[in-house]
């Protein structure tokens, strides 16, 4: 029997969306007759990215809790009740065999209702510090797939499986041919290339840093592929030249990674996992504006293994030029970072998560 039904939920950022799509793609390969439904948050990027990947999605009226008192927070109880009721309706109508949550507030209501209906649930936690939604859902989940050690601080130890984070399929199959990848971006195939990625939504502080250092990069003989994010694109598209390519969003990240000699990146879990597989020297600039400073913890896990460099936003003014110059001028340091970061890659994460889903289906069939 292969006509199973799967609901996948997670969103808000690419770090929650792409793992869900990768898991769906793997399950679809195993069960070509299976049906899939994604559940996201209305108005967030999953409502565009998931249909583009070929899957149906339904949106909930839900958003996260803000750290300060806002109208959104006052509406949160109403949104949560509305989303729980809507989730129950989706589950009754679609009748999934397994529900998979990849984090982000959209996954909360649907997994909570699935657990209440005794539908098997799998959580996937990308970060080294568990998100609020997954901590709320963990007691009712059947399996929790994680990417870091010591996650029993947050979750029941008997439910944890260390799988790593799923990454986009084309990252795993990328062929490292920097010259042809640079030509794709209309850049000089022979020139050293810096890739800048501030997360799927962009980063104001990283964009400011890059814009103020364009002459510095030029003096080092670098060309740039710069993903500034959709909110910032109008501000920075005027920086584009023959050696600087500015994008709101890069759909062909496999080619961007191939083209790069050095990468500057936020330290979201999805980016960290992809960069371990890519194996290029990385300077992480973690976002300080995330729950429990988890991006800094993600980056520190690599820095402690001599697998990456990290600068906090507060250190950029003082230290960026010196740290970056040293990296550019030391082939030995770049090679060491490349070798060490590759050792931390967990390229079979998607397969192992799908294995866990398959085991739950078999247990469920045995029980009935």
Image: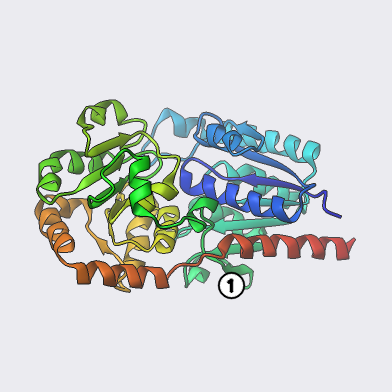
Depicted 17 relative to depicted 122: above or below:
above
Q: Which residue is depicted at the point 23% across and 32% down?
A: 240
Q: Is residue 287 left or right of residue 167?
A: left
Q: How many marks?
A: 1
Q: Foreground: 38 or 314?
A: 38
Q: Is residue 116 left or right of residue 244?
A: right
Where the C terminus falls, by quadrant?
bottom right
User: Residue beneath label 1, please?
Assistant: 157
- For residue 290, say whether it is visible: no
Q: Is residue 134 left or right of residue 327?
A: right
Q: Quadrant of residue 37?
A: top right
Q: Foreground: 91 or 179?
A: 179
In this picture the colour scheme is rainbow
Residue 283 location (% of width, % of height):
26, 58
Depicted 65 relative to depicted 339: above or below:
above
Q: Is residue 368 left or right of residue 338?
A: right
Callout 1 environment at 10 Å: few (<14), some (14 to 19), or many (20+)?
Answer: few
Q: Foreground: 104 or 115?
A: 104
Where the N terminus falls, by quadrant?
bottom right
Residue 47 location (% of width, % of height):
56, 32
Residue 33 location (% of width, % of height):
80, 47
């Amino acid at each position: 029997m292969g006509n199973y039904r799967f609901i996948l939920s997670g969103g808000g950022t690419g770090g929650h969306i792409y793992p869900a799509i990768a898991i769906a793609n793997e399950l679809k390969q195993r069960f070509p007759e299976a049906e899939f439904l994604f559940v996201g948050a209305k108005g967030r990027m999953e409502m565009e990215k998931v249909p583009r990947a070929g899957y149906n999605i339904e949106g909930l009226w839900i958003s996260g809790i803000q750290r300060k008192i806002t109208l959104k927070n006052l509406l949160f109880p109403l949104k949560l009740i509305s989303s729980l009721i809507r989730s129950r309706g989706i589950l009754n109508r679609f009748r999934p065999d397994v529900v998979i949550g990849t984090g982000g507030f959209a996954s909360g209501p649907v997994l909570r209702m699935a657990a209440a209906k005794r539908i098997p649930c799998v959580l996937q936690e990308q970060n080294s510090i568990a998100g609020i939604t997954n901590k709320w859902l963990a007691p009712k989940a059947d399996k929790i797939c994680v990417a870091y050690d010591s996650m029993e601080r947050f979750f029941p130890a008997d439910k944890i499986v260390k799988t790593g984070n799923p990454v986009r399929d084309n990252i795993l199959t990328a062929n490292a041919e920097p010259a042809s990848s640079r030509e794709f971006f209309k850049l000089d195939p022979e020139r050293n290339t810096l890739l800048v990625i501030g997360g799927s939504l962009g980063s104001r502080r990283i964009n400011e840093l890059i814009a103020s250092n364009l002459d510095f990069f030029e003096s080092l003989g670098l060309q740039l592929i710069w993903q500034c994010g959709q909110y910032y694109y109008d501000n920075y598209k005027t920086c584009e030249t023959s050696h600087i390519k500015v994008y709101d969003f890069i759909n062909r990240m496999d080619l961007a990674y191939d083209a790069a000699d050095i990468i500057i990146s936020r330290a979201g879990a999805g980016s960290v996992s992809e960069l371990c597989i890519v194996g290029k020297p990385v300077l992480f600039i973690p976002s300080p504006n995330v729950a429990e400073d988890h991006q800094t913890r993600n980056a520190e896990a690599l820095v402690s293994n001599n697998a990456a460099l990290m600068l906090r936003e507060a250190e950029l003014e003082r230290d960026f030029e010196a740290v970056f110059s040293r990296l550019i001028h030391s082939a030995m340091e770049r090679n060491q970072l490349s070798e060490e970061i590759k050792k931390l890659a967990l390229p079979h994460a998607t397969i192992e998560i799908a294995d866990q889903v398959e085991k739950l289906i078999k247990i469920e069939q045995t029980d009935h």
